[in-house]
Image (cartoon, helix red, strand yellow):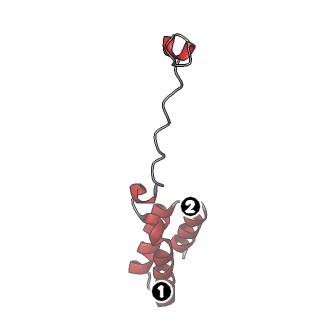
Amino acid sequence: RALAGSGLAHEEQKQWAQAAKYYDEVATKSPDKTLQSWAKQRLAAIEPRLKPAAENKPAPKPAPKSAPKSADDPKAASGGAKP
């Protein structure tokens, strides 16, 4: 039961890998069948959060548009028109 409580504490802290470790140990080693079943349910509930970080990252933002021309650029000073 202590391992199950540790798993819950880690889950509440969003420490998914640590929570999964404790839940897995309870699910495989506990003599209490009810507790085993509960731990398996918790594992299933947090499994989507255990995916590699690359899969959970949002798509990259597009590159910024090019910066405006500086005042040192003769085209920028004349507005780009030829005299």
Instruction: Specify few, some or many for label 1: CA neighbours under 10 Å numbering under 14, 14-19, or 20 or more.
Output: some
Q: Residue at x 49, y 71 (%)?
A: 46
Q: What residue did someone put label 2 on?
A: 14
- Residue 4: percent from left, percent from top: 53, 74
Residue projecting furthest to the front: 83
Q: Residue at x 49, y 79 (%)?
A: 39
User: Helix or strand or loop: what does disc 1 sit on?
Assistant: helix
Q: Nearer the viewer, residue 75 or 34?
A: 75
Q: Quadrant of residue 10?
A: bottom right
Disc 1 residue type (three-letter): Ser
- Residue 54: percent from left, percent from top: 40, 55
Q: Is residue 73 visible?
A: no
Q: Is residue 38 visible?
A: yes
Q: Residue at x 38, y 79 (%)?
A: 28
Q: What residue did someone put label 1 on?
A: 37
Question: Which quadrant is home to the N terminus?
Answer: bottom right
Disc 2 residue type (three-letter): Lys
Q: In the picture shown, does residue 2 fall above or below 51?
A: below
